[in-house]
Each structure stands twice: as structure tokens, then as C-alpha cells.
């Protein structure tokens, strides 16, 4: 009888611990991809997939804080920045009908860019991107993008194959609706080390000003 009581107590304890752990897990919120503080939205994200060569782009909205579908990107104001491999578009010029553009603040600390500049933004134009790798070399194609971001991810060939490193420049992006975000393209790998996944940190000013603090 004594042994039966001990077993019963142990089973009850196990159930309580299991229930407690489950409740703790349920009560612990998943980390938010975007943190909102007043008019500022801060994101530190890895895009959901790697893009193919050719005109395969992932579109992102700073206002929504997420990737968005933009099949008709030329006439849409729902996106602000887009990525194809390490090529970048803003919603401006040849890429879109928005008020966008980009400015290279240089190799500075992300936290040191406190305010967006008022002028000096470069709009998108035609660029050359990789269409495919063939047995004879690289096949290029004409697309649209923003040359300000050229070199944001640098590829280096080594004995173990190519590696990809960020140049760590901080960029100021004018959005489709004329607002501002500071952007750091900080890496090119997924969490498991697969290349092709853009890592981006940004602060977006959702209000009417240009300040990032």
C-alpha cells in the first residue's frame, strides 16, 4: 500500500510538472519580428527564402513589417524594398511608381544614423543581374534596381567555394509613401548556415518626421 501511494504521488507530480511546462510554453510569447515604439518600427529579420537567379524578387513593406505579394510591382505602393539574391530595389524610378530612393550613409554604426537626410536619394534604374550560370560562364539579363546598394553583399571565391559577407554600410531608404527607414543589410545566411537568405535590420519612421530615435 505504501509503495502504491509513492507511485501515485510521483505520477501526480509528473503531471503537474508537465502541465506547468506546457502552460509556461503557451504563456511565453514568440519574439516579435518587429518592435513598435511610438512612430518607430524596428525589425531584425531574415527573409523567408532564397531567391532564384533571374527576375525572382522578394518584396517587403516597412509599414506592414512583413514580406508582401507584389505581382504588379511597377504600379503598387504596397512595397518599399525588394531583394533578388544580393540585388536591391526601392519603390522608385524604373522599379516602381512610389516616392522611394536610397542613400548610402557609409561604413558607420547603425545607431549613429539618427536622422534621414532630406535630399540626395538615388532612384532605381536599369541594372544587370545574373540570369543563370551556364557551362560557358554567366548569363546576364537586364532588370531594374538601385545601384546605391551595389556591393552590400560581397562574394569571395575560396577553396571551399564562395562565401558572402556584408559590407556593413548603412543605407537610408525613402519608402513608397515618402517616409524613411535606415537599413543595414547585415548578412546572407539562414539560421542553419544556408547562403542566399538576406538578413536585414531596420528602423522605420512611420510618422511625418525623419528622426530614427
Image: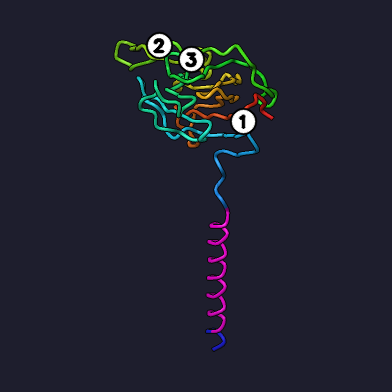
Judged left or right of residue 127, residue 154 is right
Please state the horizontal and vertical placement of residue 180, each as a whole percent of the image: 59, 24
- Which of the two discs, 3 and 2, sits closer to the camera? 3
Residue at the image point whose x is 56% and y is 21% from the top: 173
Residue at the image point whose x is 57% and y is 67% from the top: 17
Q: Is residue 101 above or below residue 34?
A: above
> Label 3 to label 1, Cα distance in Å?
25 Å
Range of magenta residues: 5-28
Q: Dot 1, how many residues are within 10 Å of its Cα: few (below 14), some (14-19), or many (20+)?
A: few
Please state the horizontal and vertical placement of residue 200, each as a whole percent of the image: 54, 29
**Residue holding disc 1:** 207
Judged left or right of residue 39, residue 76 is left
Label number found at residue 128 = 2
Q: Quadrant of residue 136?
A: top left
**Residue holding disc 3:** 146
Label number found at residue 36 = none
Q: Dot 2, how many residues are within 10 Å of its Cα: few (below 14), some (14-19), or many (20+)?
A: few
Amino acid at each position: 500500500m505504501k509503495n502504491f501511494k509513492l507511485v501515485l504521488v510521483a505520477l501526480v507530480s509528473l503531471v503537474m510538472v508537465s502541465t506547468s511546462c506546457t502552460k509556461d510554453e503557451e504563456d511565453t510569447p514568440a519574439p516579435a519580428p518587429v518592435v513598435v515604439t511610438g512612430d518607430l518600427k524596428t525589425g531584425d529579420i531574415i527573409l523567408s527564402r532564397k531567391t532564384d537567379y533571374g527576375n525572382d524578387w522578394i518584396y517587403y513593406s516597412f509599414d506592414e513589417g512583413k514580406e508582401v505579394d507584389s505581382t504588379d510591382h511597377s504600379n503598387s505602393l504596397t512595397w518599399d524594398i525588394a531583394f533578388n539574391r544580393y540585388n536591391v530595389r526601392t519603390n522608385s524610378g524604373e522599379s516602381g511608381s512610389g516616392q522611394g530612393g536610397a542613400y548610402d550613409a557609409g561604413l558607420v554604426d547603425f545607431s549613429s544614423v539618427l536622422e534621414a537626410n532630406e535630399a540626395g536619394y538615388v532612384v532605381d534604374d536599369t541594372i544587370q543581374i545574373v540570369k543563370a550560370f551556364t557551362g560557358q560562364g554567366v548569363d546576364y539579363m537586364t532588370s531594374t534596381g538601385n545601384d546605391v546598394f551595389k556591393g552590400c553583399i560581397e562574394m569571395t571565391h575560396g577553396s571551399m567555394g564562395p562565401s558572402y559577407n556584408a559590407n556593413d554600410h548603412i543605407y537610408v531608404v525613402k519608402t513608397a509613401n515618402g517616409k524613411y527607414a535606415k537599413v543595414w543589410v547585415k548578412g546572407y545566411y539562414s539560421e542553419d548556415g544556408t547562403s542566399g537568405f538576406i538578413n536585414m535590420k531596420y528602423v522605420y519612421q512611420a510618422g511625418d518626421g525623419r528622426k530614427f530615435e
